[in-house]
Image (spheres, rainbow, N blue to C red):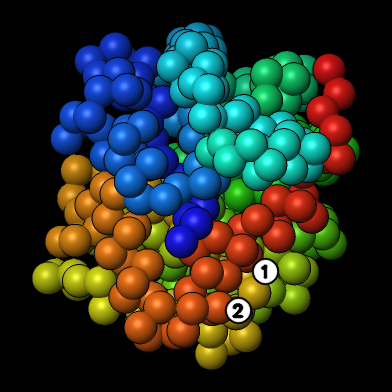
Amino acid sequence: MLVADAHVDVLMKLAEGRVAFLEDSPNLRANYHSLREGGVATQVFALYVDPSLDSYTQLAVVLRQIDAFYQQVAILADVRAVRSREDLRIARQQGQMAAILSLEGGGCLRGSVEILRILYRLGVRGVGLTWNDANELADGCGELRGAGLTRVGRDVLREMQHWSMWIDLAHLHDAGVRDVLRLTDGPVMASHANARAVHPHRRNLTDDVIREIIRRDGWMGLTFQPSFVGRDPVGIDDVFRHLDHVLDLGGHRHVGFGSDFDGTSADIPGLAASRDYRAFAERLCDRYGQDLAQAFLFGNFEAFLMRQLPSTSPL
Ligand SMILES: [Zn+2]
């Protein structure tokens, strides 16, 4: 069964140079072999940089991670860097894994739409404006001030829409989420977040936001980071509680997964690396049937990408 995963933090580790993508190391949960064994046919690779670094350093680290993406990931014969719907079709025809870049936190942009455009030209197709902290664009979900988007945050949002980059609501403060929903009317997504009604955590989405994602034909990726899933001890059944809740809200065609592998040291037993998608897929099939399981694992995100990605990739 094919799998799409909207969030891993592999590039952070590759750029640090302590592990390589082709190494089948437990230190890299979403390494090449693990992804292949898991049946992962679409993988979004996040660019995440410690936001406490100064913004010049953040940008330098992001560029190093993009270099690692092209040097170690997209260079492989059975992987394709996907920047457009055309690329995605070719990847499917050739049986390649579609590899897509996204930015997790806009601190490296320094409030500049020019840097955003450069990152777009380097292949970045989705952006989360913040991580948990505040930056020039908006407040993240962990910022006590709890403000929405700044003026430059709105400029960046407008530029993202112009280039058809997806808007990732994960990590954004509720006030920023409200601003984004007020300032846009197109699809929005959340790459790795769960339902707050099931587990009250600031990183999870309220029912109102989930309904809005569904109404706008967006997409949300449930995540396996245990602290966002439930109270200890967390198991796979707790992930199903979030999934069932999103289905109750009508999200059959708008939900999938964003694992957060390599972004956290904690994990759910049996769901700790990309290769675990194989057994997880069986659990999904038993519970929801083949067609829905395939939609959650792959089809819904594929459809979202076909709605969201530019038709071709301009330079
Ligand atoms: Zn994250």
Please tell me which residue is depicted at 50% across the width and 57% down the height of the picture. 2
Please tell me which residue is depicted at 68% across the width and 19% down the height of the picture. 122
Marks 2 & 1, CB-CB < 8 Å contact: yes
Q: Nearer the viewer's eye, disc 2 or disc 1?
A: 2
Relative to the observer, which residue lies in front, 103 or 10? 10
Circle 1: element type:
helix
Please tell me which residue is depicted at 34% across the width and 57% down the height of the picture. 277
**Farthest bottom residue in view:** 248
**Residue 209 position by quadrant:** bottom right
Q: CA distance from mark 2 to mark 1?
A: 9 Å
Say if residue 46 shows up in the picture: yes
Instruction: Specify whether tag 1 is near ligand 1 (CB below 8 Å).
Output: no
Q: What residue sits right under mark 2 in the picture? A: 251
47 lies above or below 63? below
> Mark 1, residues whose alpha carbon is within 10 Å: few (<14), some, or many (≥20)?
many
> x, y (%) of residue 18?
23, 15
Viewport quadrant of the C terminus: top right
Say if residue 261 shows up in the picture: no
Circle 2: element type:
loop
Residue type at numbered disc 2: Gly
**Residue 9 position by quadrant:** top left
Please tell me which residue is depicted at 60% across the width and 79% down the height of the picture. 251
> Mark 2, residues whose alpha carbon is within 10 Å: few (<14), some, or many (≥20)?
many
Q: What residue sits right under mark 1 in the picture? A: 213
64 lies above or below 308? above
> x, y (%) of residue 240?
35, 78
